[in-house]
């Protein structure tokens, strides 16, 4: 298995888009095309805080970790929020999700950031099995207002 974790590149758009659409389907979300286009544009914009790391297995993009950093009032250095993590369903369980998280841990450590955090649906048992190997849920419950 030849796995490479790297930043997204403009030529990855079609591969990322297929995975992104699979990710949205997994969560039963229907986003407007302009929102998806805007997300990709931010990933490609070096001035944006939104970044994507891609898992490339034997030359094929098979997963992504979209993340961004932000300041915190609880620590002096930024936190990193892993907003979207997705692995092609046909190859889950092969350590690719772990490789993407470990890659983000390395980035956070190298940049001197304080914390890496994420959330998932309560019923996402497969993902939670992986996440629980890093840290148990801290018990926070998310509230979200939509405007």
Image (cartoon, rainbow, N blue to C red):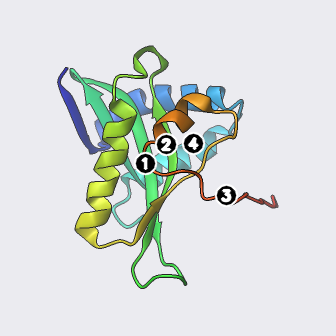
Q: Name the residue under label 1.
A: 134
Q: Is residue 95 left or right of residue 89?
A: left
Q: Name the residue under label 2.
A: 131
Q: What secondary structure is marked by label 1? A: loop
In terms of image quadrants, where is residue 120? top right
Q: Is residue 64 left or right of residue 60?
A: right
Judged from this view, the residue extending furthest toward the left is 2
- Residue 124's x, y, as percent? 63, 33
Q: Which of marks 4 and 2 is in front?
A: 2
Q: How far apart are marks 1 and 3 (CA)?
A: 15 Å
Q: Nearer the viewer, mark 3 or mark 4?
A: 3
- Residue 31's x, y, as percent? 68, 39
In the rendered structure, are the residues bearing label 4 and label 2 in contact, judged by CB atoms less than 8 Å apart?
Answer: no
Residue depicted at x 43% and y 48%: 134
In the rendered structure, are the residues bearing label 1 and label 2 in contact, judged by CB atoms less than 8 Å apart?
Answer: yes
Q: Mark 4 points at which residue?
A: 36
Q: Which of marks 3 and 4 is nearer the N terminus?
A: 4
Q: Earlier in the sequence, mark 1 or mark 3?
A: 1
**122 or 34: nearer the viewer:** 122
Q: Which of marks 1 and 4 is nearer the N terminus?
A: 4
- The quadrant the C terminus occupies is bottom right
Q: Distance between the residues labelled 3 and 2?
A: 14 Å
Q: Distance between the residues labelled 1 and 4?
A: 30 Å
Q: Earlier in the sequence, mark 4 or mark 2?
A: 4
Q: Name the residue under label 3.
A: 139
Q: How many residues crowd around disc 4 within 10 Å: few (fewer than 14), some, or many (20 or more)?
A: some
Q: How far apart are marks 3 and 4 (CA)?
A: 31 Å
Judged from this view, the residue extending furthest toward the top is 90
- Residue 78's x, y, as percent? 42, 75
Q: How far apart are marks 4 and 2 (CA)?
A: 26 Å
Q: How far apart are marks 1 and 2 (CA)?
A: 5 Å
């Amino acid at each position: 298995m030849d796995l490479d974790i790297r930043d997204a590149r403009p030529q990855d758009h079609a591969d990322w888009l297929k995975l992104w659409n699979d990710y949205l389907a997994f969560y039963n979300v229907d986003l407007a095309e302009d929102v998806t286009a805007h997300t990709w544009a931010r990933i490609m914009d070096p001035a944006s805080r939104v970044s994507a790391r891609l898992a490339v297995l034997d030359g094929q993009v098979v997963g992504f970790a979209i993340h961004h950093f932000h300041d915190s009032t609880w620590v002096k250095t930024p936190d990193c929020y892993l907003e979207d993590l997705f692995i092609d369903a046909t190859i889950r369980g092969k350590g690719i999700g772990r490789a993407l998280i470990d890659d983000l841990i390395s980035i956070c450590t190298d940049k001197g950031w304080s914390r890496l955090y994420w959330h998932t649906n309560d019923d996402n048992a497969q993902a939670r099995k992986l996440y629980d190997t890093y840290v148990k849920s801290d018990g926070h419950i998310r509230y979200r207002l939509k405007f």
